[in-house]
Image (cartoon, rainbow, N blue to C red):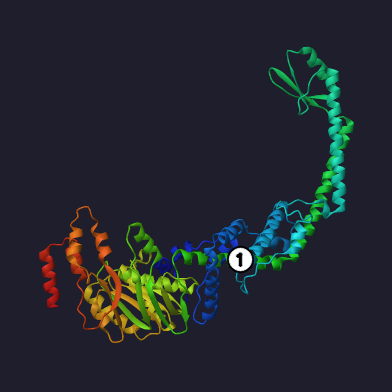
Amino acid sequence: MDFLDNLTSEALDFDYILSNIKTLTPYGKTYKEQLRPYLPGEEESLVRELDKIDSVMKYLRDSEFKKDIKGILVHIKDLRTSVKRTMEGSVLNEVELFELKNFIFFLRDLETIIKKYKLDQFEDIEIKRIEKLEKLLDPEDTKIWTFYIYDVYSDELKRIRGQKRQTEKQIKVEKKALKVKIKEELQLDLRPDGTLVISKEDADNLKLVEKHPNLSYVSETYMNVKFTIKPTEEISELDRKLSHLKEREELEEFKIRERLSGEIANCKKSLFRNMASIGKLDLILGKAQYAVDIGGVRPKISENYHIYIENGRHPKVEEFLSKKGLQFTPITIDLAKGVTCITGANMGGKTISLKLVGLLVTMAQYGLFVPAEKMSLGLSNFVSTSIGDMQSTDKGLSTFGGEIKLVQEAIMKADKRGLILVDELARGTNPDEGYAISKAVVKDLKDKDSITLVTTHYDNIANLEGVLHLQVVGLSKIDFDVLDSELKDVDADKMDIINRFMDYRLKVVERTSEVPRDAINIARLMGLEEKIIEDALKILEEK
């Protein structure tokens, strides 16, 4: 049984939350991709995860710490493949050895930062320098980040490179002497690259150059002929010697890289442990930073199955409203096993309240702080939703059919302690049948082991024994004269004004409470003819 299916994740905007948790390393990205919820029975593990976030949040207030830690994490590369290659007996090339040397230096610097800021340590996060590999990849202790196959790795390599340098020097001397000789004999200047260009009109010099034993033809144009120095036997012999030395050098360097690769393979446990620790720390820092960004609080985890949210906010909706100059109205809600119904007019924020509950529960169970003043909850085995247009064209289902399919799937697992969220149940069919189906579904779910939150237009559904009825406060406490005067502004956006005056908070409703008239009030404010409004009020009174 999945905790969260794709449809529910999309409905709750959970992917939006995950996209705002930033990781800086490939290892942190891997752990983020592997995120899973903590389920009933894993309360202690979840508490430990929240402890870690709590612990590092205080360090994020230190700009120097953030600068220091980010300066390292952003440069860390994914070297898991290189280490695995050494375990298979492969020989690393110089680029891979350079990257590993950098990683080893990053470990050293991370350990220094952790000690400098006295960062709290956790049993599964231990970043520790590997001094053996520091000495191996920086044998001369230069502290320089570049990598080179040093002479100190092998006496044989040192001898070969010495002979190679001497041979290169001899070749240079011989070539210089040959250029001087040619210049003296021909009284002509050679180019720095050892070539000589003669005009075709200069027939005398062209004839001399063509006959010279140390020059050979290269190419020509319609104006000039190009020659280059022909190596002497001495130079050719030195070139052959140099080529042989280079081959010996490459072979010796390969042997050294082979030995270094073997030593790296021997340190695989330390390397992978550090990579894992970096990934976990990176993800914890990402979670903590997001908690700071949203003003999040630590949810209190309980074995008692309930959900309590005090002044909770939906981050994506809050961001959307903020761009329009509007404020999100925080929601407080207390839910226990059984069914809770939310009623109120459209525009009353019922769906947002539903999504908010599902999102904050999901965030908490994924080990995140939540956007609220307080939250406590018992863990759910699943979160299931029926929100929005459930039409399924690929299966030939109508909106109502798709909706009922999801509700039935939720009912089938309702005895397994989960959170069920249903928005405007049976809205896709006629009102009489919709009311009957809605009431029957609520009646079935109210005694189940899950927490069910339903939004509905049908007030009578919420009047069932054992069902908690919540109602959007709406426009019930608004001075309509003030609101009406603002709406008379011809340039005003009426929807935005009504949203600003709407009170989205929830209140508990007793069975005898009067049915709110927000829908009629909104219709009047949006300009529906007064005679229609009066007829609607009469019909409501006659019902």
In the displayed structure image, the side of residue 218 where residue 2 appears, left or right:
left
The quarter of the image holding the C terminus is: bottom left
Where in the figure is residue 298, as x and y percent of width and height? Answer: 47, 73
Which residue is nearer to you in this view: 84 or 17?
Answer: 17
- Which quadrant holds residue 295? bottom left
Q: Is residue 83 visible?
A: yes
- Which quadrant holds residue 335? bottom left
In the displayed structure image, the side of residue 433 where residue 48 appears, left or right:
right
Tally of marks: 1
Examine the rendered structure and indicate whether residue 471 appears above or below residue 228: below
User: What residue is shown with label 1?
Assistant: 117
Examine the rendered structure and indicate whether residue 73 appears above or below residue 247: below
Examine the rendered structure and indicate whether residue 467 appears above or below residue 9: below
Which structural element holds mark 1? loop
Residue beneath the point at 30% across and 78% down = 341
In the displayed structure image, the side of residue 278 where residue 94 appears, left or right:
right
Where in the figure is residue 511, as x and y percent of width and height? Answer: 23, 83
Q: Residues within 10 Å of mark 1 (few under 14, many from 20)?
A: few
Which residue is nearer to you in this view: 7 or 252?
Answer: 252
- Which quadrant holds residue 501? bottom left
Where in the figure is residue 400, as x and y percent of width and height? Answer: 30, 70
In the rendered structure, which amino acid carries the disc numbered 1? Answer: Tyr
Q: Is residue 4 visible?
A: no
Where in the figure is residue 139, as x and y percent of width and height? Answer: 79, 56
Residue beneath the point at 74% across and 60% down = 134
